[in-house]
Amino acid sequence: MRNGWLTAPRVRLAGLVTGTSAVLAMVVVGCTNVTDGDAAVADGEAPLYRASVTAASEEAAASSSAREAERQASLTVEAVRTSCEAMSSSSAEAVGSVNNYVDAMNNSPADVARTAGPAVDALNHSADLVAGSLSDPLTSELRDALNGWVDAARGVATAIAGNYGIDAFNAAIEVLNRAKTTALDRCDAAYR
């Protein structure tokens, strides 16, 4: 029993050595071939290869440029939509609140104080919303028009909150009306 047990590890060791030797012999035998020949390009093939590489490179650049143009156009459309929707919806609310304030000034002086706060809040909300929507993809003309609305809305809010006289208030309203028309016209043009 003792002899049988000791011989098994020797047989395994002998098998491992024989197997490793066989693998090494195969690796050495597989690497003995050498290829003859010259590393030269056929005379007429080099210009064709260069032209092929140039054409492939130009095609890849054009494709990349087209994808970038599409991406920029998409960003611009999204920027216009975001800013112009902010302008359109918030300016309507602001103008409605200012009209309530003006109506109170003209017809019901007791309601002036009650309508002043909502008008100031709506104007400042619109100015903040539009200013926060501005981004780089907008054209400078559209951005300037939207900033014109922001400034005019804050100007009227200041006039109402400061209880400015009629002439100063009307001047601020004229600026607001022009700014609104200009901004909405620029938005309409940007959608075309």
Image (cartoon, helix red, strand yellow):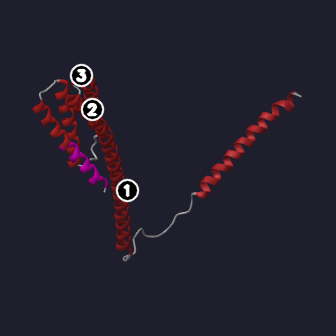
Q: Which mark is residue 184?
A: none
Classify residue 118 by image quadrant: top left
Residue at figure coordinates x 30%, y 39% from the top left: 92
Query: Which element carries disc 3, helix, strand or loop?
Result: helix
The N terminus - image quarter: top right
The verdict on residue 187 being magenta is yes
Q: Which mark is residue 67?
A: 1
Task: Please provide percent x and percent y for residue 43.
Answer: 36, 76
Residue at figure coordinates x 72%, y 41% from the top left: 16
Is the residue 9 above or below the residue 140 in the image?
Answer: above
User: Does the residue at mark 1 contact the one at mark 2 (Cβ under 8 Å)?
Assistant: no
Q: Which of 133 and 88 is in front in this view?
A: 88
Task: Please provide percent x and percent y for residue 129.
Answer: 30, 35
Q: Which of marks 3 and 2 is nearer the N terminus?
A: 2
CA separation in Å, label 3 and label 1: 61 Å
Magenta range is: 178-191
Query: Which element carries disc 1, helix, strand or loop?
Result: helix
CA separation in Å, label 3 and label 2: 13 Å
Q: According to the image, label 2 marks what residue?
A: 100
Q: Earlier in the sequence, mark 3 or mark 1?
A: 1
